[in-house]
């Protein structure tokens, strides 16, 4: 059994008591690793130093805070954007994107501290355990994975009691209404009143999309090879750009999702999300692809996108198929360069214009006015050959029956 364990630490009740639980039940030293993936907005009432100190107070021999916001933005959110990734056509993979970032740091710290295992605070009912464990095994097949919350069988009350018994300081004592997971790409809200899929999410579940703006506005997103690089002409790093778009689009109360989601572990769950930047950037990016990608590439990519999203959702960020799809996706983005205009008004965000110096829209070809450059005479032969196979079939095999008769030959 491992002598040292690296624990994914959030500062919350579960991972705080997990520190002591691992010491007591596995006889190990615990190294707590908190990874900042942009969840600061949620933890606003306390800073990372307070979170670090709590881990130490709980008994960790070492507590480390890693600022992974730029990494999260550049290496995880950006690839998801290039892939137009939405699980089940809706969810932009918020939590699913942060887990591999955290895993990377858990494994790095395990190596640095000579730990033989990593641990996480997930229960057995969710996707996050899958992502932590499959991710860890992909990067470090030799490491053990321990999941205390899957075995300890503690209720929330038991946990609070356990914390009190070991003098583990807790953050907020007020009753927690929802289970929240947050990062740069958005915010997932579960539990409480929204566990009934019929119940409308109460207004208090939302923090990133509280409507404050009243005047319609426009924001122009600039892209280079698929990556958003500017907002209204101002160059920004992915991390700052995401934050800015979250702020602007969120202020219009747009970017919410309310869905029933199919978890990897077989459970249907009611999920509420707010991800204004992710959804707005996905909208703009896909629109620019319509302008800049040749038809076959555009269509083939669209077929692969749901698969990419599913792999990442299922914890297979580090996997050979995902890597191969990434190679395709990156190649596909070479010419996705240009600008997209987003119109904003309370409760709405939509594309009103797009342009690109290398766009495939050719006004001469598209126009119906006098500047038309399209060779109309080419169309007749093209269309005749396009339909030749069907015409032959209709003449030889369907003659007399009529191709639109019902299959059993009955007349309508
Ligand atoms: N259902 C989402 C997913 O699997 C969000 C999970 C969020 N986790 C949480 N503890 N609230 O990606």
Image: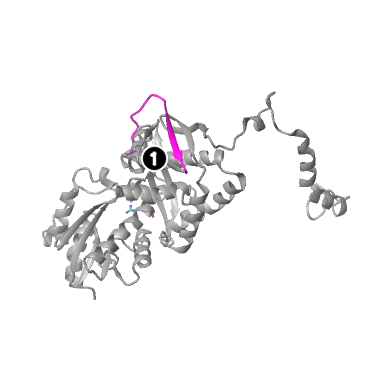
Whole-percent x and y of residue 89? 49, 48
Q: Residue at x 76, y 38 (%)?
A: 379
Residue 170: image location, x then y, percent: 16, 53
- Residue that appears at 41% across and 43% down: 278
Q: Is residue 223 above or below residue 364?
A: below
Q: Is residue 3 left or right of residue 360?
A: left
Q: Nearer the viewer, residue 387 or 169?
A: 387
Residue at figure coordinates x 55%, y 40% from the top left: 292
Give the extent of the magenta segment.
Answer: 208-225
Inspect this view and state whether residue 35 appears: yes
- Of 2 and 17, the residue lying toward us: 2
> Is residue 30 positioned above or below 286 on the image?
below
Number of callouts: 1
Which residue corresponds to mark 1? 277
In the figure, 312 relative to 231: above or below? below
**53 sits to left or right of 92:** left
Task: State the image quarter where residue 100 is shown.
Answer: bottom left
């Amino acid at each position: 059994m491992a002598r040292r364990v690296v624990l994914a630490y959030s500062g919350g009740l579960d991972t705080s008591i997990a520190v002591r639980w691992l010491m007591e039940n596995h006889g190990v030293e615990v190294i707590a690793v908190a990874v900042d993936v942009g969840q600061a907005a949620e933890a606003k009432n306390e800073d990372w130093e307070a979170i670090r100190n709590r881990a130490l107070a709980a008994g960790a021999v070492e507590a480390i805070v890693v600022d992974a916001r730029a990494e999260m933005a550049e290496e995880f959110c950006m690839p998801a954007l290039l892939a137009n990734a939405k699980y089940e056509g809706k969810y932009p993979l918020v939590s699913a994107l942060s887990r591999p970032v955290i895993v990377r740091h858990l494994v790095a710290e395990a190596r640095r501290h000579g730990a033989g295992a990593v641990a996480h605070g997930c229960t057995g009912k969710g996707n996050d355990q899958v992502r932590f464990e499959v991710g860890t095994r992909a990067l470090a097949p030799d490491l053990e994975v321990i999941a205390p919350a899957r075995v300890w069988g503690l209720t929330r009350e038991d946990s609070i009691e356990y914390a009190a018994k070991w003098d583990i300081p807790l953050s907020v004592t007020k009753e927690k209404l929802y289970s929240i997971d947050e990062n740069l790409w958005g915010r997932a809200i579960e539990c409480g009143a929204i566990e009934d899929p019929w119940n409308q999410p109460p207004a208090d579940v939302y923090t990133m999309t509280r409507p404050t703006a009243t005047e319609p506005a426009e924001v122009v997103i600039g892209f280079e090879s698929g990556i958003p690089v500017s907002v209204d002409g101002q160059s920004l790093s992915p991390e700052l750009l995401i934050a800015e778009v979250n702020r602007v689009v969120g202020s219009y109360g747009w970017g919410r999702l309310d869905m029933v989601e199919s978890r990897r572990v077989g459970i249907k769950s009611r999920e509420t999300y707010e991800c204004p930047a992710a959804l707005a950037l996905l909208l703009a990016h896909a629109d620019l692809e319509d302008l800049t990608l040749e038809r076959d590439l555009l269509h083939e990519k669209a077929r692969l996108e749901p698969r990419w999203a599913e792999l990442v959702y299922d914890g297979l960020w580090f996997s050979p198929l995902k890597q191969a799809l990434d190679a395709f996706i990156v190649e596909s983005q070479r010419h996705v360069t240009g600008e997209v205009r987003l119109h904003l008004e309370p409760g709405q965000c939509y594309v009103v214009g797009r342009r690109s110096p290398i766009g495939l829209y050719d006004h001469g070809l598209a126009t119906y006015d006098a500047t038309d450059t399209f060779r109309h005479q080419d169309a007749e032969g093209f269309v005749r050959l396009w339909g030749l196979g069907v015409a032959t079939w209709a003449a030889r095999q369907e003659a007399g029956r009529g191709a639109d008769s019902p299959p059993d030959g009955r007349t309508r």
